[in-house]
Amino acid sequence: MVLLPLGTMGEKKCPHCGEWSNWNQQFTDICDHCGKTLGGRDLVYQEKRAAQEQENKENWIFYIKETDSDFVKGMKNAGNFFYTVYISIITFIAWLIAALPG
């Protein structure tokens, strides 16, 4: 197995046509023969994962939308701040409980 330095071109077998194509190690690279992406299942997984992450961000109670008023944006910023402080305190207490016995 030959490892190529980052940014160099290699070859990858196209999951659609089975021919070898130049590959810049990006899932969105196009096959030289059939014109489809070389990413295959990896590209589909990456796109699905990005969509799930965006959906999770938008479902967060303190997610700030562009359409929110200034008051709502300020309240959501305060909510995010206090949530961070709360999680920090809980994490410190958990660490303290774990560190005390041993």
Image: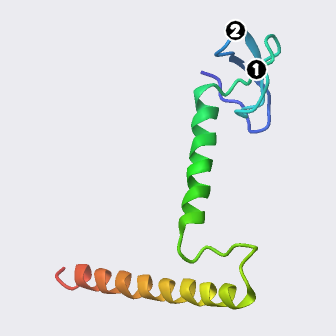
The image shows residue 26 at horizontal and vertical percentages of 73, 34
Residue 90 in the image: above or below residue 42: below
Name the residue furthest left: 101
Q: Amino acid at mark 1?
A: Lys
Numbered badge on residue 36: 1
Q: Residues within 10 Å of mark 2 (few under 14, many from 20)?
A: few
Q: x%, y% of residue 8?
A: 79, 32
**97 to the left or right of 82:** left
Looking at the image, residue 62 sits to the left or right of residue 20; the answer is: left
Could you tell me residue 23's position as x and y percent?
A: 76, 25
Is tag 1's residue or tag 2's residue first in the polypeptide sequence? 2
Which residue is at 72% across, 8% downward?
19
**Amino acid tagged 2:** Cys
49 relative position to 34: left or right: left
- Per the rendering, the mark at residue 17 is 2
The secondary element bearing badge 1 is classed as loop
| Cα gap from disc 1 to disc 2, whole angstroms | 9 Å
The answer to whether the residues at label 1 and label 2 have Cβ atoms under 8 Å apart is yes
Q: In the figure, residue 12 lies in which quadrant? A: top right
Q: Nearer the viewer, residue 42 or 71?
A: 71
Image quarter hosting the C terminus: bottom left
